[in-house]
Image (tube, rainbow, N blue to C red):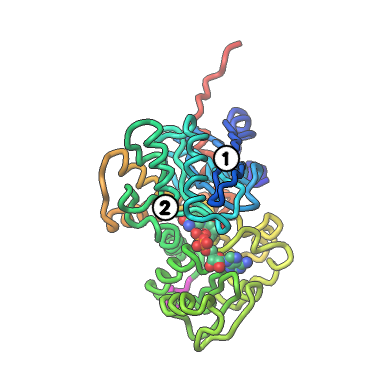
């Protein structure tokens, strides 16, 4: 759907259209896992390797009860676009296991992860396919993937997975990379989107997990005022502005943000409709749909979640002249630092946080400006512009010499 919309503004070669019409490889595996009670359960796992045109497949592994091959395939296509927008030397892939990780013990999760790697090992590898974390997986699981793969191939191969713990070859700056990256992208685009300075801008953030909390902290450091925050249990609001560190401490102690002193409780739906300058969906997909898009009052939507705006909602926001900074650009910080981790592992180096974040800022500023320029040239929104940049880069990898019969 998004490809069709993007190709309306960016002509692509017939070869690229064919290459992107289906993933290069889809793997579906059954993973038998010995449970703690001695029984044997079989879980279904997937890896979709969508495109290697720009480099090894790159994309997270999701552990979720609703994960299935269709979802993983769509996300693998998305990763192809995201890596191309970011200009990193990676293709696109994604993995998933249909499981609720909260229902498994730590040992069962380890056996599941190692079993998944044993099934996938022939198609993984630092130059082939490099998984990272996604919903329901974390640094520990990435460390297990690298460990199991290393055992199978008989040599330490940390570059086979990213988002690992620091002592297993993880990169400095990886945990904050997506949130801080969103701030870098926003700061680069801000002069084009508004005449106001950060200190004159108010922000509401839906989702106060890894991404939302690092973004909130970094926005406050730049002078923005956070007036609303929410998590799955509900939200809080105050015109006076919130301190994200204090909100996090309160959430840890009380299990939710609701009741944070000096704020009013607000529902997740109402949070998106607050009168503010910037609204940030940083939780789940499909947060902004045709039923609430018309009620959005912010001038800027910064998409930190993957797929938070439906295509119908996109059209409504475009008509309202609301700028949507698309997910493939806004949240690319995570995959960029993952690629830095891969590079450090390959070179056997360990970069400082200053170096990692400095490189990230430079890259995201450059690519945000690129996307902005493309949107003005094509007179289109930032999402189509980002896809246009990505498609052009993917097309440039193809050999266009006419083939003789
Ligand atoms: N972590 C990364 O590096 C990364 C990179 C790119 C994209 N993303 C995307 O960003 C989003 C958030 O990821 P994360 O890593 O912060 O996850 P997380 O699990 O750390 O946090 C998710 C947050 O959303 C909240 N939430 C869940 N359901 C909600 C609802 N219905 N309404 C409001 N809040 C709700 C949760 O309470 C939590 O605060 C996801 O869409 C993810 O795919 C994450």
Q: Identify the image quadrant of residue 388.
A: top right
**Residue 329 appears in view:** no
Q: Residue at x 40, y 69 (%)?
A: 218
Q: Residue at x 31, y 56 (%)?
A: 358
Alpha carbon distance from label 2 to label 1:
21 Å
Seen as rendered, the residue at the extreme right is 291
Residue underneath mark 1 = 32
For label 2, the crowd category at 10 Å Cα-Cα, with few meaning under 14, some 14 to 19 and many 20 or more, is: some
The count of marks equals 2
Picture disc at residue 98:
none
Ligand 1 quarter of the rendering:
bottom right
Q: Identify the image quadrant of residue 235.
A: bottom right
Between circles 2 and 1, the one closer to the viewer is 1
Q: Toward the viewer: 268 or 279?
A: 268
Residue underneath mark 2 = 140
* Image coordinates for residue 116, horizontal then vertical, percent: 52, 40
Q: Identify the image quadrant of residue 243.
A: bottom left
Magenta stretch, residue numbers: 195-200
**Residue 138 appears in view:** yes
Seen as rendered, the residue at the extreme front is 38
Give the quadrant of the C terminus. Answer: top right
Mark found first going from the N terminus, 2 or 1:
1
């Amino acid at each position: 759907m998004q490809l069709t919309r993007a190709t309306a503004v960016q002509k692509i070669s017939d070869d690229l259209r064919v290459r992107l019409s289906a993933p290069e490889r889809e793997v579906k595996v059954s993973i038998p896992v010995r449970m703690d009670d001695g029984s044997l359960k079989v879980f279904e796992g997937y890896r979709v390797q969508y495109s290697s045109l720009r480099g090894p497949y790159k994309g997270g592994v999701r552990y979720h009860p609703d994960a299935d091959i269709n979802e993983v395939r769509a996300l693998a296509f998305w990763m192809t676009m995201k890596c191309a927008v970011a200009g990193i030397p990676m293709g696109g892939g994604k993995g998933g296991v249909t499981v609720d990780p909260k229902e498994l013990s730590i040992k069962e999760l380890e056996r599941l992860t190692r079993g998944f790697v044993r099934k996938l090992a022939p198609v993984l590898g630092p130059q082939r396919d490099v998984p990272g974390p996604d919903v329901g997986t974390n640094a520990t699981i990435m460390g297990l993937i690298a460990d199991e793969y290393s055992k199978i191939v008989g040599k330490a191969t940390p570059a086979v997975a990213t988002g690992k713990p620091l002592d297993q070859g993880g990169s400095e700056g990886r945990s904050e990379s997506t949130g801080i990256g969103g701030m870098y992208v926003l700061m680069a685009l801000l002069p084009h989107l508004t005449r106001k300075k950060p200190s004159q801008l108010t922000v509401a953030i839906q989702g106060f997990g890894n991404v939302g909390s690092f973004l909130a902290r970094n926005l406050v450091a730049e002078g923005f005022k956070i007036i609303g925050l929410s998590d799955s249990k509900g939200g809080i609001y105050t015109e006076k502005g919130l301190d994200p560190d204090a909100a996090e401490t309160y959430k840890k102690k009380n299990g939710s943000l609701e009741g944070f002193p000096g704020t009013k409780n607000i529902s997740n739906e109402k949070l998106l409709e607050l009168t503010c300058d910037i609204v940030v969906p940083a939780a789940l997909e499909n947060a902004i749909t045709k039923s609430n898009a018309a009620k959005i009052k912010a001038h800027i939507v910064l998409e930190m979640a993957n797929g938070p705006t439906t295509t119908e909602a996109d059209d409504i926001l475009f008509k309202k002249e609301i700028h949507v900074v698309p997910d493939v650009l806004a949240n690319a910080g995570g995959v960029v630092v993952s690629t830095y981790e891969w590079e450090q592992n390959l070179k056997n180096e360990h970069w400082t946080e200053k170096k990692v974040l400095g490189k990230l800022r430079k890259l995201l500023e450059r690519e945000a400006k690129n996307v902005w320029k493309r949107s003005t040239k094509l007179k289109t929104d930032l999402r189509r512009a980002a896809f246009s940049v990505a498609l052009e880069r993917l097309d440039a990898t193809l050999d266009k010499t006419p083939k003789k019969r």
